[in-house]
Amino acid sequence: MKLYNYFRSGTSFRVRIALNLKGLNYEYLPVHLARGEQHGAAYRAISPDGLVPVLDVAGNPDEALLSQSMAIIEYLDETHPEPPLLPADALGRARVRALAQTVACEIHPINNLRILKYLGGPLGLSEAQRAEWYNHWVREGLLAYERRLRDLQAERAARGLPPSVYSYGDTPTLADCCLVPQVVNGRRFGLDYADLDIPLTLAAFDACMRLDAFQRAMPDRCPDAER
C-alpha cells in the first residue's frame, strides 16, 4: 500500500496510527500542503479534491484509491480486522463513532489548513486571530469529548465495570485515532490544556502515547518532517 499524506495533517496522522495499530506496511508518499503540492495536476489526478490522505490500497493508482480518513480507517478495519478499531456490538460502534466524529466533524473541518488560509487571506485575520479561532473550536470540541467520556464512564460504573483505559474500553479504537492528532495539533497552536477540565480525555491521550503505534505516527517521526 501507498499513503499520500502530509506530516502535519491531522487526517493523515489518523491513518498512520490505524496502519500502525494494524501492523500494516506502507510506502510513505509526502504531499507538502504548505507548498501547494496538492494543487498540482499530478496530485489532482490522484485526489480530485486535492486533499490528503489518499491510500493506494493495491500499490497501483489505476486500481484502488481511497480518500477521506474515516472511510480509509473503516476500510482497514474491515479488511484487516485484528486488532479491531470498532467494538463488536452495534451500540459500542455507535459510541465510538460519536466520539470520533466529535473530532472529525465538529473540530477539524473548521480548523484545517485551507480554512486557516482563507481566514488569513480574503478575510484578513492576523496570525494571532487565526490561532484564537483554532483554539476556540478545539477547546469547545474537547470539552464536548470530555462530556461524552464522563457519560460513558458513568454507564460503565453502573454496570460494575472499571473506567476505560482508552477513550472506549481497554484497547485503542477509531476514537483514539482521531483524538491523538487533535491534541497534538492543539499543542502546536499553543493551546494550554492545563486550563481545560478534561482529565478523562487527557488520560486516554496519555494511554495512547505509551503505545509504539501512536509514537511512530507522530509528525516529527515522518520522513518529510520539517526539522
Image: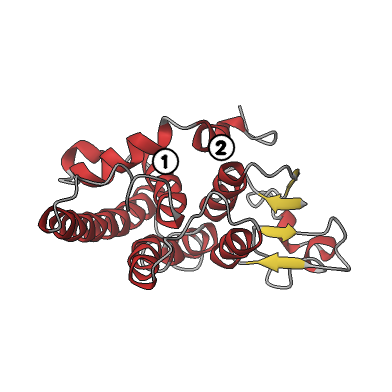
Q: Residue at x 60, y 46 (%)?
A: 22
Which residue in the protein does label 1 denote? 184
Picture disc at residue 219:
2
Q: Residue at x 33, y 45 (%)?
A: 166
Please, is residue 212 above or below residue 50 in the view? above
Q: Residue at x 65, y 57 (%)?
A: 53
Please report contact status of discs 2 and 1: CB closer than 8 Å, yes or no: yes
In the visual, does 132 lie left or right of 150? right
| Residue in front for this viewpoint, 185 or 13 | 13
| Residue in front for this viewpoint, 91 or 166 | 91
Q: Where is residue 74? Give x, y as percent.
A: 56, 64
Please, is residue 222 above or below residue 198 in the view? above
Q: Secondary structure at mark 1?
A: helix
Amino acid carrying mark 1 in the image: Val
Residue extending furthest toward the top: 227
In the visual, does 22 lie left or right of 172? right
- Mark 1, residues whose alpha carbon is within 10 Å: few (<14), some, or many (≥20)? some
